[in-house]
Amino acid sequence: MRHHPSIGVVIPAFHAADDLHRTLSAFQALPDDVQSRLEVAVMDGGSTDRTLEVVSTFASLVKHTVSQQDAGVYDAMNRGAREIQSPFVWFMGAGDLPHAHGLSALLDRLHDAPHDGHACGVQAMTPREPGVPETFDPRFGRGLNWRNTLHHQGLVVPTDWIQNAPFSTAYRVLADYAWILDRRNEGKHIHCHPEVVLASVSGGGLSRQFRPALYREEHRLKKGRVTGVVRLAHLVWLPAKWAFKQMSKARSI
């Protein structure tokens, strides 16, 4: 039985032929009853390597392909959300892998809360950077004041949430974190399903390099999004987070 797509899967890519091939192969290997409920879109940033050749080999899977220069990964994610027709959207990266069992479980739950978001667990692939846990469990609440407890590879939200309030391209690495804080602050609801693992996530991304610029961007995005004593505490909290990552890196050497 064929189903109408429920989730639009947006995959930004740029000079990522091998990683994209691995991701699309994993989606193509999903059971038919799961794959038929997905609408896959690849948003390429104008690659000049084999990225578009890879996409062409998955013509039966990929429903939308756009290749043009963009303003970074969040611009590509916004464009993908405008391209798809599915009521929910899910952002994966080139190199990330879906979990068939978790995806099937989530698809069966979406109709119970069609106007809310859903957050699932994600696993970090090996080798992991120092200080990175094996599994990221989703939490939606005050803990977001201190660190991002939702990861976009585990987050499935109504498509119109993104269409009406796109990711800010003013942030290079943490626009999804800023976006999640905004949705929490305006009263949106995201159901957390820590028992459901939705994806395995590849390493090497900018958010896992833990450079000082990352924490400067976090300090900037939290202006107006966290306030009062919590805001003041970040003057100590952010340097402490950076120091912990450096200590973890030193111990691993």
Image: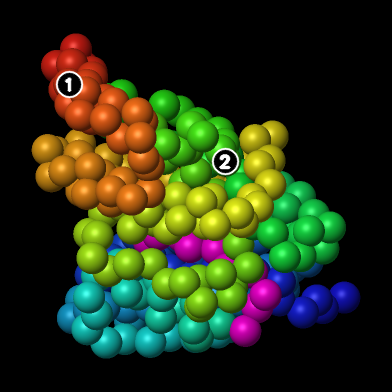
Identify which residue, 252 or 116, lies in the foreground. Answer: 116
In the rendered structure, find residue 243 and report the number of the disc placed on it. Answer: 1
Q: Where in the figure is residue 128, as x and y percent of width and height?
A: 33, 31
Reply above or below: 185 against 228.
below
Which residues are drawn in magenta? 85-95
Residue farthest front in this picture: 228
The relative height of residue 139 versus residue 105 in the rendered view (above or below) is above
Type of residue at label 1? Ala
Could you say which quadrant of the image residue 134 lies in? top left
Residue 101 visible in the snapshot? yes
Report the Cα–Cα distance between label 2 and label 1: 25 Å
Q: Quadrant of the N terminus?
A: bottom right
Q: Residues within 10 Å of mark 2 (few under 14, many from 20)?
A: some
Q: Which residue is mark 2?
A: 140
Q: Determine the residue positioned at 18% across, 81% down.
A: 48
Residue placed most toward the observer, 173 or 58: 173
